[in-house]
Image (cartoon, grey):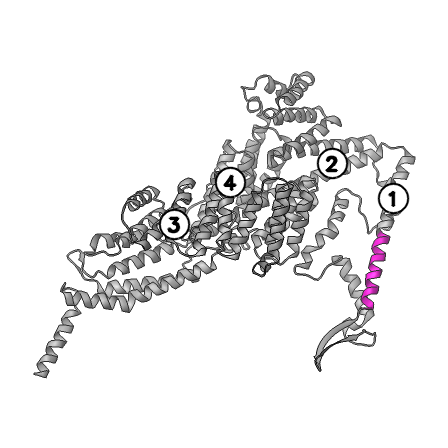
């Protein structure tokens, strides 16, 4: 009897393992085994993977942060994202762009971030393969709903939306009993958006918002829907959705984070009072030290009121610097103080706070970069372009936001051109001024210059001797504990010691050599960069002005300077023409590249007052003064237009003013057009270096011509053909800004978006093989 019972039991177990029967025993067996053998472990692995991604994710506070601190649309962090802007190191040809942008790249190496997701996918597929009870198109193992959803989620976070959609469709179409239907619909909306099907995603979200959902599903829905609205720039609806999401999310962190995002969105909508309230709410929730400090920075940027409000703000922020929780972020708090001071137009106080921020330990590279950029802006407004450029260089090295970094690189490159022109003008003005003096005045002028040089060098010599003397008498001190007391042991180095730092002679030579190379330095991190600019930038200015010649043994002789002074009329006229052309170009750069109206007007007005040596320069300056002031200051523009018509009646500039409805420059740009055709032929012949040189020549020769945009694009494409990726992207950025609204600007923007998209696609590492594409080389 026992044998019969055992045989019957074994037979029932064997039949229950079948996936072709729909009985209760079979369904229960496969439901249990599929969960505990594979699906449960897959879910655990997925959650661990997402947790590690959230911990590693770095928010970009220069834009609206994500609702969930993990971004399935971007696999890379900010640091990784910046690698897309590096210049190729090997084979400097256009083909390098293809590898960077994912064109013809067959590299299938998986990143560490996708390896965990691949394990999840493997477990999900094993569950389906071994425990699927698919009979006549219907799936009777209800636990496989978990497997299909697990696979869809893994592919979604792996950024393979079409694979995810495939499993969601199988899940919805085959399961007899679908317990995860609502959750699956939410992921259906997410994957539709990721695949670019925003219309379908919107339809799914609209339907879900009307349905009854479990609390957990409703939490996921409002979080996902809020991010969807953010991506679609539907900011008022996003604020409402985030407010609802707060009700379903427990804990300080999500509520504080959502309040911060609401503050950012309110700023975008110019609702400053709402933004202030949301930022204060985010701070009070105490979500994390980073969000709390970033809330304070945002509040400083929205500061209103009088001096009392400002003082209270500074007092509050200084109080925070003394709190232990924020000790590692003191540099950010000083930045917040600087932002508040700048908001109140207290530039000197702002500068002090920026400097103090630099002295503190760095906690966020982006904030450190913003500090450098802000200091650069302060010096730029003075204007002190050498110092501004030095700070912009540091900012470019630190800023993590790719778009902000690229724009600053373009601005910094343009600034370097401005520096050359600005100091060329000052140098030539100085030379011309001295050349017009009588011999006695010239000798007095150079004697004063020599006296200043001697005084400066003597001060430096005395300071160096004092420091060397101080170093020679340095006492090395150390403390040790003994018998319950602290004793200080001192040791004065002597020349008899063999150790380098105890040998005064060697030490003095070393210090002297160091100071020659590096100047005065403090003991701190990054010492090579920190003090070098403050010591040597004034020397850079002197060199740009032609005044610094420290290595010349005749620098204290008046005749040395008199010999270098130009004397014949031709040389003086050449200097005058050079400075006039430079000042005209400088004024146009201020307006067209920096949108700095006041500096542009000042430069061009000063040029007209000198007056210019050539009429062509003068009429261009007057016409551009009219062009710059035409909309914002019509009365002033009228004065300049009257002068153009009166003094240069037979020019295309006068004709343009008299016939504003006709594009005179387009009609009269025959010379520029002919030159462009000549340069374009060389482009077709592959003479890209020559094309660049000629295109830059055209920018100087036809600064106001309608063809300038086309020359700029041609120079940019030449950079692309030469493999100069960074220069190419910078040129596109500059053209898109300078020619915004025009054909050239639109083309540059279109290409910029094209390359950015391609770079992001390469980062996504989709499973499908990349298609071979070419960079569109069309030039209008």
The reply to whether callout 1 and callout 3 are in contact (CB within 8 Å) is no
Mark 3 surroundings within 10 Å by alpha-carbon count, few (fewer than 14), some (14 through 19), many (20 or more): many
In the picture of the structure, the residue carrying the numbered disc 1 is: 560
Comes first in the chain, label 4 or label 2: 4
In the picture of the structure, the residue carrying the numbered disc 3 is: 245
Comes first in the chain, label 3 or label 4: 3
The quarter in which the N terminus is drawn is bottom left
Note whether residue 767 is visible. Answer: no
* Total tally of numbered discs in the picture: 4
In the picture of the structure, the residue carrying the numbered disc 4 is: 273
Mark 2 surroundings within 10 Å by alpha-carbon count, few (fewer than 14), some (14 through 19), many (20 or more): many
Highlighted magenta segment, given as a residue range: 457-473
Mark 4 surroundings within 10 Å by alpha-carbon count, few (fewer than 14), some (14 through 19), many (20 or more): few
Taking the magenta stretch, the answer to whether it contains residue 464 is yes
Helix, strand or loop: magenta stretch? helix
Comes first in the chain, label 4 or label 1: 4
Mark 1 surroundings within 10 Å by alpha-carbon count, few (fewer than 14), some (14 through 19), many (20 or more): some
Note whether residue 672 is visible. Answer: yes
Nearer the observer, disc 4 or disc 2? Answer: 4
As drawn, the label of residue 425 is 2
């Amino acid at each position: 009897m026992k044998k019969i019972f055992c045989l019957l039991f074994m037979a029932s177990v064997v039949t229950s393992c079948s996936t072709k029967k729909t009985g209760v025993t079979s369904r229960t067996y496969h439901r249990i085994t599929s969960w505990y053998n594979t699906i449960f472990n897959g879910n655990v692995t997925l959650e661990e993977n997402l947790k590690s991604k959230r911990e590693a994710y770095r928010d970009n506070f220069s834009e609206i942060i994500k609702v969930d601190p993990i971004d399935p649309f971007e696999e890379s962090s900010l640091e990784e994202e910046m690698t897309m802007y590096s210049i190729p190191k090997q084979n400097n040809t256009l083909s390098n762009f293809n590898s960077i942008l994912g064109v013809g790249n067959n590299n299938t190496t998986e990143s560490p971030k996708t390896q965990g997701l691949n394990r999840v996918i493997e477990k999900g597929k094993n569950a389906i393969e071994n425990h699927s009870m698919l009979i006549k198109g219907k799936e009777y193992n209800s636990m496989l709903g978990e497997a299909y959803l697990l696979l869809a989620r893994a592919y979604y976070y792996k950024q393979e939306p079409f694979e995810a959609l495939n499993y969601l469709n199988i899940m919805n179409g085959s399961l007899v009993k679908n317990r995860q239907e609502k959750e699956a619909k939410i992921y259906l909306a997410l994957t539709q958006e990721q695949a670019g099907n925003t219309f379908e995603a919107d339809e799914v979200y609209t339907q879900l918002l009307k349905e009854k959902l479990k609390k957990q599903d409703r939490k996921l829905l409002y979080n996902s829907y809020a991010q969807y609205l953010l991506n679609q720039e539907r900011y008022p609806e996003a604020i409402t959705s985030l407010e609802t999401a707060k009700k379903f999310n427990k804990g300080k962190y999500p509520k504080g984070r959502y309040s911060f995002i609401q503050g950012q969105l309110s700023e975008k909508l110019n609702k400053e009072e709402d933004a202030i309230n949301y930022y204060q709410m985010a701070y009070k929730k105490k979500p994390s030290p980073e969000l709390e400090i970033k809330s304070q920075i945002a509040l400083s940027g929205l500061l209103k009121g009088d001096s009392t409000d400002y003082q209270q703000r500074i007092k509050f922020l200084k109080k925070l610097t003394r709190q232990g929780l924020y000790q590692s972020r003191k540099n950010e708090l000083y930045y917040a103080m600087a932002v508040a001071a700048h908001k109140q137009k207290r530039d000197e106080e702002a500068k002090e706070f920026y400097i103090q921020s630099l002295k503190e330990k760095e906690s966020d590279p982006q904030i450190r970069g913003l500090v450098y950029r802000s200091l650069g802006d302060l010096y730029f407004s003075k204007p002190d372009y050498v110092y501004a450029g030095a700070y912009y260089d540091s900012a470019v090295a630190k800023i993590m936001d790719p778009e902000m970094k690229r724009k600053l690189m373009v601005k910094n490159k343009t600034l370097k051109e401005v520096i050359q022109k600005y100091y060329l003008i000052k140098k030539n003005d100085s030379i011309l001024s001295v050349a017009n003096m009588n011999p006695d005045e010239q000798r007095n002028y150079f004697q004063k210059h020599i006296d200043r040089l001697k005084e400066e060098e003597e001060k430096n010599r005395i300071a160096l001797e004092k420091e060397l003397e101080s170093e020679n008498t340095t006492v090395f001190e150390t403390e040790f504990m003994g018998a319950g007391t602290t004793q200080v042991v001192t040791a004065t180095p002597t020349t008899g010691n063999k150790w380098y730092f105890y040998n005064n002679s060697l030490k003095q030579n070393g210090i002297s050599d160091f100071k020659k190379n590096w100047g005065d330095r403090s003991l701190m991190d990054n010492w090579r960069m920190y003090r070098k600019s403050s010591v040597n930038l004034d020397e850079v200015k002197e060199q740009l002005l032609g005044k610094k010649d420290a290595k010349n043994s005749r620098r204290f002789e008046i005749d040395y300077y008199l010999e270098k002074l130009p004397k014949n009329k031709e040389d003086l006229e050449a200097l005058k023409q050079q400075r006039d052309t430079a000042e005209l170009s400088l004024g146009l750069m201020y307006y067209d590249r920096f949108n700095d109206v006041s500096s542009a007007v000042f430069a061009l007005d000063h040029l007209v007052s000198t007056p210019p040596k050539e009429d062509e320069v003068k009429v261009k300056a007057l016409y551009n003064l009219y062009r710059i002031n035409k909309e914002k200051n019509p009365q002033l523009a009228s004065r300049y237009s009257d002068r153009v018509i009166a003094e240069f009646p037979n020019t295309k500039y006068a004709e343009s003013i008299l016939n504003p409805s006709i594009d005179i420059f387009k009609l009269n740009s025959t010379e520029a057009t002919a030159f462009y055709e000549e340069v374009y032929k060389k482009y077709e012949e592959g003479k890209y270096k020559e094309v660049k040189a000629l295109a830059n020549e055209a920018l100087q020769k036809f600064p106001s011509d309608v063809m300038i945009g086309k020359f700029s694009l041609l120079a940019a494409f030449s950079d692309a053909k030469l493999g100069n990726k960074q220069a190419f992207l910078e040129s596109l950025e500059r053209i898109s800004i300078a020619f915004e609204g025009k054909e050239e600007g639109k083309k540059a923007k279109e290409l910029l978006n094209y390359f950015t998209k391609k770079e992001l696609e390469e980062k996504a590492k989709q499973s499908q093989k990349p298609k071979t594409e070419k960079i569109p080389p069309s030039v209008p």
